[in-house]
Amino acid sequence: RGEGEAGRRHRGPPRRRADMNLALLDPFSHNELPEVIEAKLEVPSTVSVCAFNRRGSMLAGGCDNGHVIVWDFETHGVARTLELHEAPVTSVSWTKSSRRLLSSGADGRLAVWDVLGACVVQLLARENLEFTGASTHPLRRDVCLACSSSTVVASREVSLVFWEAAGPRSLALLSPDAPADEPAGGGGEGAAGGSGGSRRQPPPLVACFDKPGERVLIGSGKGLVTLLDLSGARLAEMQVAGGPVLRSLALSRDGMSFVLVCADRVIRAFALERLFEGGAAAGREHQDVVSRVPWALAAFTSDSEHVIGAAAAAEQKLYIWDGDRQLAKLLDGPKDP
């Protein structure tokens, strides 16, 4: 104990023994949170989605011009430029091995890339459809999860896509024509309008696999979060208090929690087990109560202890909260021109 306290008072370069004792006495003092935004990557087009590979050595970005750019994150140089999509790229997702990359686009294309060869090895193309998001299976490279919306009618779908030798095969988990996440009766999203008869496109669904890839978590535009198995059977569901539109959904690295970006400018974090209790829940709420900034994305840190929120504003700000909802860091980036 005395040695640990001495190590805490020590102002010079820490010794290994003192450092080890300090970590045992106060493990939270050694959480490595970023202090500043270190670098800015130059891109030829607006990057709307991005994802690191498992090792953190490569970064893939999906551009509004349809290109997918892969950076070597150690040198910050462009390693590959992948060209296929004819509309904005809506998601990018790495396989576990980092040899392949999944991209989805608003052009109705879902592509699996061989990153080293810079070529498409699997392709699914649909007419009158846009893929609003997709993610690879955490363990298998022959299956992925895809969210889509029709471009001609007010409908949405979450499906599994199996990359088979005979061609891709889809299995719908949540059907757009009978969306169980919408309230029964008239007046729901996508219902026919009055005299005009026009139909408003409902917000896209958001979805992700759980950590072992045995279940799928789906969030709807009405604030309903549903847990399904891979056959589509419902296992649990929960209503987010207030029923806000859900913009994004992400799972923590340990698989124990998930975080939602909501359209009411609040980020909400929940334990995965909370789904099995049903009913309505508010979760741990994170927001900028002064500026009331909207959020572009939210995720957990690699240790699953902190929540990160990226502001959807000209000022590129990252907020980092601890488990007690206290703001631990606020990182200011360059302002968009």
Image (cartoon, helix red, strand yellow):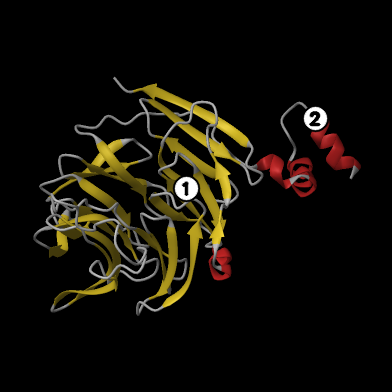
Query: Residue 322, image x and y in percent?
Result: 62, 42
Q: Position of residue 314 (x, y in %)?
A: 35, 25
Residue type indicated by callout 2 = His
Q: Amino acid at mark 1?
A: Ala
Asked whether 228 or 244 is in front, the reply is 244
Residue at 24% in and 32% down: 43
Could you tell me which residue is drawn at 23 percent across and 69 percent down? Answer: 177
Q: Residue at x 19, y 57 (%)?
A: 192
- Tell me the quarter of the picture where residue 16 sits: top right
- Residue visible at 72% across and 47% down in the picture: 27
Disc on res. 10: 2
Nearer-N-terminus badge (1/2): 2
Q: Nearer the viewer, residue 218 or 155?
A: 155
Residue found at the far right of this picture: 2
The residue mark sitting in front, 1 or 2, is 1
Left or right: 303 as drawn, with respect to 210: right
Q: Residues within 10 Å of mark 1 (few under 14, many from 20)?
A: many
Give SS at disc 2. Answer: loop
Name above or below for residue 15 compared with residue 123: above
Q: In the image shown, does 222 or 249 lie closer to the viewer?
A: 222
Q: Is residue 312 visible?
A: yes
Q: Quadrant of the C terminus?
A: top left
Q: Which residue is mark 1?
A: 299
Q: Could you tell me how far apart the alpha carbons at marks 1 and 2 are, in whole angstroms?
A: 35 Å
Q: In which quarter of the view is residue 151 placed?
A: bottom left
For the residue carrying disc 2, how many other residues have a C-alpha within 10 Å: few (<14), some (14-19), or many (20+)?
A: few
Q: Are marks 1 and 2 in contact (CB under 8 Å)?
A: no
Measured as percent of width and height from the top left, residue 153 is found at: 15, 58
Of 214 and 268, nearer the camera is 268
